[in-house]
Amino acid sequence: MTALAGGLPRMMRPSPHQNFPRGGYSLEVSTPLGQGRVNQLGGVFINGRPLPNHIRHKIVEMAHHGVRPCVISRQLRVSHGCVSKILCRYQETGSIRPGAIGGSKPKQTAAPEVDKKIEEYKSENPGMFSWEIRDKLLKDGICDRNNVPSVSAISRIMRSKFGGVAEDEDDEEVVKREMEENEPRTKHSIDGILGDRCSCGFLGAF
DNA sequence: CACGTGACGGTTGAG
DNA sequence: GACTCAACCGTCACG
């Protein structure tokens, strides 16, 4: 939904300089990456991109030590809304990692029971071809001619279930590993921008 | 003052 | 290969 703004006039009224690009402080940090912006707390962030893992980790760690969210927010120069979100998410999921950004939801090509059946067939007989599965769905009366998924749909389902699905291990282990690796695959990571500010002791700067 | 929350502008990536 | 679109992001401001 596109947030019926007219219907709910109580929340945010667009103020003169509501967001960063407009108004007085369109503070941009010139970096080799050219992506950095500065928030009201003086912290650097990349609009639309998650905070680097070490910051997220720091937020959780500080909260764990009983540091209040507002203090964390000021120390790390991250908006309190963000601190709140990250902490909330951490409590709910146990993970500090951001969600998967972008992409489309896999198309719901088959009814859940059909989906399950395909999975069943495949695990019983891993060598089974898509068209064989399709055939079997018809034969077993799971589907009829009208609603049986196409061969390509079946193979897509199989691919998503059996092919190269790495177990999602959102562990601190993974986070630590990523931190050590310094996220080498990120095209433009904020790490590079505020890396030294953070790693050489934001506490000291305070 | 501290905090929760919704709108916003932005980025990303599967389809 | 360009495009679409729904997911997520962090910030900001309101309450």
Image: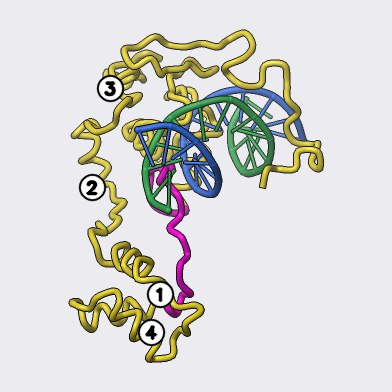
Chain colours: A yellow, B green, C blue
> In this orientation, which residue lies closer to the viewer: A187 or A57?
A187
CA gap, disc 3 to disc 4? Answer: 57 Å
A95 above or below A67? below
CA gap, disc 4 to disc 1? Answer: 10 Å
Q: Chain of mark 1?
A: A
A203 above or below C15? above
> Can you give x and y, in whole percent of width and height, for residue A70 in the image?
53, 30
Q: Which residues are magenta?
A: A92-115
| Residue corresponding to mark 1 | A115
- As shown in the figure, which amino acid type bears the numbered disc 1? Asp
Tag 2's secondary structure?
A: helix
Tell me if label 1 and label 2 are in contact, CB under 8 Å: no
Q: Residues within 10 Å of mark 4 (few under 14, many from 20)?
A: many
Q: Earlier in the sequence, mark 1 or mark 2?
A: 1
CA gap, disc 3 to disc 1? Answer: 48 Å
Q: Earlier in the sequence, mark 3 or mark 1?
A: 1
CA gap, disc 2 to disc 4? Answer: 42 Å
Mark on residue A137?
4
Tag 3's secondary structure?
A: helix
Q: Earlier in the sequence, mark 3 or mark 2?
A: 2
Q: Residue at x 33, y 35 (%)?
A: A53
